[in-house]
């Protein structure tokens, strides 16, 4: 007896060990608006500096934007070499092979006069430019100026290739000489005129492969900055930025840092200037320079001086209101909003201030106006929340997402879902939560049928390259899984996005229906077991929740911190009831594993306990890792009710397929076996009784035959 039972004791020990998959730390996750609704409504996301400065300044009429030829924001190393290579390549354009070789040779000289002599065969503009460039490189600014001026004195049709180059170089020379000249003002004016000339030549169609026309904006801005003209410099950098130059963007950031270093009296005076004020505001609204919630040391000074200098300002009022709101100065924010007009940002702030005053009706109206005012394509870019989630802030989507919180509180659940769903993937986690936990399945189905047609199926190449599913496909999959969970098998199939998922859903539904319709127990058990197997192996695909507890959105690989939903100022009792009614049963991670073991247990209920199928069904169910408690309970059921099998020592680890056909025979043998077992203690009396009965029967038969013989 001991030999037979010892593997079972070892199995009990093994079931106490952790069999589930250990989950490592996951990737970064997007922000969820519904987790902390009050915080979501109270916070105003920081702006994006790149977007903010794109609103400032003006482009130069006729000047072309930079192209990939000179713009590479990802270039981090070897910048000087990259520029030299770009210049050398541009110098070869428009020249014959012989001329290209000669120019390359002349570039290696250090004497500009020799360049002029040896380059006599070159076109005049090429010869003069190379001579001037060599003089500039050797520090002979006077001689370089002479050559560049000679070049620009040529008739226009004789200098199509190097006019912008010469003028731009003259600007650089004059700016360098301003640091040495006794009268720097004159040199700076000469530099400014030269950069303007280079820009105009670019506009007029002279060759500009190095895009010096746009570069001249930054160079002229540097001239103005040196002359103390902050306003003019900022406007030129803003124009350079609008023409696509990364230099303009970077320069504006550096100017903000320079401004912050100035003494307060000087900075206060500069903040009276429109361009300075707008640039500083853009920086503060964007919280540029913040890192890990540490406020830059000079930011408080900037905020105080900007607030003092803009009291009653009509310029940039919505941004100034935003800055004050972010700093917690709600009174100043409200004052600025009186002059802020009807921008999306202004209405967004009015909605938040109305909520602070407890006026949800006014807040809802303001949110509606904000959503209408923000352009669909306005994008503030990527940000990190204080808890390190990420968010791509598209203000129109964010405003609608916040408005959805109020819609939920009012009981307008479908409206809330639609507002979140319109964000596409940005707030998909929130939209999915409402779709599978707040809406009824019929409300969701009606919306999908009327508004969400099936998108084209991803190709195998798309899947191999991890192209994400369209949100429409994710929503339809969510609905399909929800319908399957609720037993609406036929309806569910068509919502899945691939043939593979449709096949799995169809197979599961067929087995569940077979189980419901089967009248013979083993047939019912077989269908239940097949459904259980499908639920376990394909549950993540066809039965799981998009969000908690299964997180199909991550393929089940990660989970998010759960937030208990409680009735409160922003959460209505009816929503809580709806969420409780739609929660997973059981509400545990990988809940479909528990569904699978429940189906397997039902299959076992329909099988003779003495059959191999009974033991095999329970064995397989133990291997499905629903929970240690369930595994132990299933095993204990086998120990108490099941037959001995040779593989019992590996129960839950090496399980055969249930033999449902032979289980039918056990319905008969189980009865006879039970009778034999019941009579076994009375074996000798029964045998004697049987002999007595047999003997009596035989004597009776003999006596009957003798009587018939006498009568005959």
Image (spheres, rainbow, N blue to C red):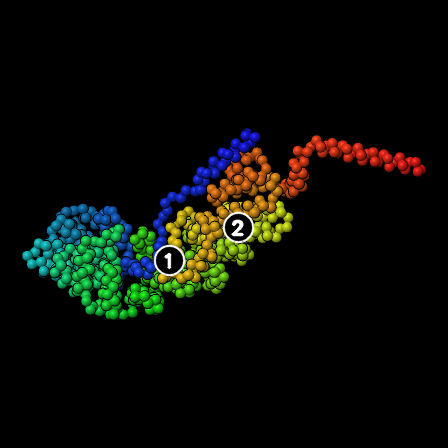
In the current view of this chain or complex, which residue is farthest to the right? 712
Judging by the rendered image, the residue that carries numbered circle 1 is 34
Q: Earlier in the sequence, mark 2 or mark 1?
A: 1
Residue 239 found in image quarter:
bottom left
580 is higher (above) or lower (below) than 9? below
Residue under the point 35% across and 59% down: 37
- Comparing 549 with 203, the one in front is 549
Residue 699 found in image quarter:
top right
Q: Quadrant of the C terminus?
A: top right
Between label 2 and label 1, give the one nearer the viewer.
1
x and y, in percent, of residue 188 in the image: 12, 59
- Comparing 701 with 294, the one in front is 701
Instruction: Tell whether label 1 touches label 2 (CB within 8 Å).
Output: no
x and y, in percent, of residue 547 in the image: 42, 53
Does residue 514 show up?
Answer: yes
x and y, in percent, of residue 655 in the image: 54, 38
Judging by the rendered image, the residue that carries numbered circle 2 is 504
- Comparing 581 with 148, the one in front is 581
């Amino acid at each position: 007896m001991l030999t037979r039972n010892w593997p079972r004791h070892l199995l009990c020990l093994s079931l106490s060990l952790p069999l589930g998959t250990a989950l490592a730390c996951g990737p970064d996750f997007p922000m969820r608006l519904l987790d902390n609704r009050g915080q979501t409504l109270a916070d105003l996301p920081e702006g994006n500096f790149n977007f903010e400065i794109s609103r400032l300044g003006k482009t130069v009429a006729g000047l072309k934007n930079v192209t990939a030829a000179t713009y590479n924001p990802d270039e981090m190393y070897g910048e000087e070499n990259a520029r030299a290579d770009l210049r050398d390549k541009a110098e070869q354009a428009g020249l014959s092979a012989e001329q290209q070789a000669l120019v390359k040779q002349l570039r290696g000289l250090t004497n500009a006069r020799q360049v002029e002599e040896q380059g006599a065969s070159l076109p005049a503009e090429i010869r003069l430019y190379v001579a001037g460039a060599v003089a500039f490189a050797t520090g002979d600014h006077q001689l370089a100026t002479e050559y560049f001026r000679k070049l620009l004195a040529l008739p226009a049709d004789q200098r199509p290739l190097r006019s912008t180059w010469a003028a731009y170089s003259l600007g650089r020379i004059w700016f360098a000489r301003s640091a040495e000249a006794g009268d720097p003002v004159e040199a700076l004016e000469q530099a400014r005129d030269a950069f303007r000339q280079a820009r105009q030549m670019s506009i007029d169609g002279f060759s500009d492969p190095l895009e010096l026309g746009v570069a001249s904006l930054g160079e002229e801005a540097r001239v103005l900055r040196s002359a103390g003209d902050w306003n003019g410099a900022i406007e030129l950098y803003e124009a350079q930025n609008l023409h696509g130059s990364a230099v303009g963007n970077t320069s504006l950031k550096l100017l903000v840092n320079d401004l912050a270093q100035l003494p307060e009296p000087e900075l206060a005076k500069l903040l009276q200037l429109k361009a300075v004020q707008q640039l500083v505001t853009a920086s503060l609204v964007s919280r540029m320079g913040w890192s890990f919630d540490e406020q830059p040391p000079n930011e408080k000074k900037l905020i105080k001086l900007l607030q003092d200098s803009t009291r009653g300002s009509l310029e940039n009022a919505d941004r100034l209101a935003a800055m004050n709101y972010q700093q917690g100065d709600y009174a100043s924010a409200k004052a600025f909003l009186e002059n802020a007009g009807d921008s999306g940002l202004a209405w967004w702030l009015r909605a938040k201030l109305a909520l602070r005053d407890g006026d949800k009706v006014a807040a809802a109206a303001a949110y509606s106006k904000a959503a209408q005012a923000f352009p669909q394509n306005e994008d503030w870019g990527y940000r990190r929340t204080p808890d390190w989630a990420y968010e791509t802030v598209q203000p129109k989507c964010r405003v609608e997402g916040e408005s959805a919180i109020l819609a939920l509180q009012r009981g307008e659940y479908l409206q809330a879902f639609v507002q979140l769903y319109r964000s596409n993937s940005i707030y998909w986690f929130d939209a999915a939560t409402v779709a599978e936990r707040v809406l009824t399945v019929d409300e969701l189905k009606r919306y999908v049928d009327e508004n969400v047609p099936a998108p084209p199926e991803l190709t195998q190449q798309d899947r191999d390259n991890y192209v994400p599913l369209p949100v429409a496909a994710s929503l339809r999959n969510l609905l399909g899984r929800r319908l399957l969970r609720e037993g609406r098998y036929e309806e569910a199939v068509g919502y899945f996005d691939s043939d593979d998922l449709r096949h799995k859903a169809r197979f599961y539904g067929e087995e569940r229906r077979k189980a419901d319709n089967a009248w013979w127990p083993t047939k019912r058990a077989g269908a239940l077991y097949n459904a259980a197997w499908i639920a376990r192996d394909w549950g993540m695909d066809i039965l799981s929740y998009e969000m908690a507890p299964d997180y199909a959105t991550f393929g089940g690989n990660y989970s998010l911190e759960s937030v208990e939903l409680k009735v409160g100022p922003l959460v209505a009792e009816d929503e809580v009831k709806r969420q409780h009614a739609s929660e997973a049963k059981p509400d545990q991670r990988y809940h479909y594993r528990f569904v699978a073991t429940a189906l397997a247990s039902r299959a076992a209920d329909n099988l003779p306990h003495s059959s191999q199928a009974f033991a095999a069904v329970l064995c397989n169910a133990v291997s499905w890792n629903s929970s240690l408690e369930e595994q132990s309970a299933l095993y204990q059921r086998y120990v108490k009710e099941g037959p001995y099998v040779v593989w019992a020592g590996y129960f839950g680890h090496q399980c055969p397929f249930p033999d449902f056909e032979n289980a039918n025979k056990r319905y008969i043998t189980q009865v006879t076996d039970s009778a034999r077992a019941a009579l076994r203690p009375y074996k000798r009396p029964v045998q004697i009784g049987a002999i007595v009965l047999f003997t009596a029967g035989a004597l009776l038969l003999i006596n009957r035959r003798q009587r018939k013989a006498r009568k005959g």
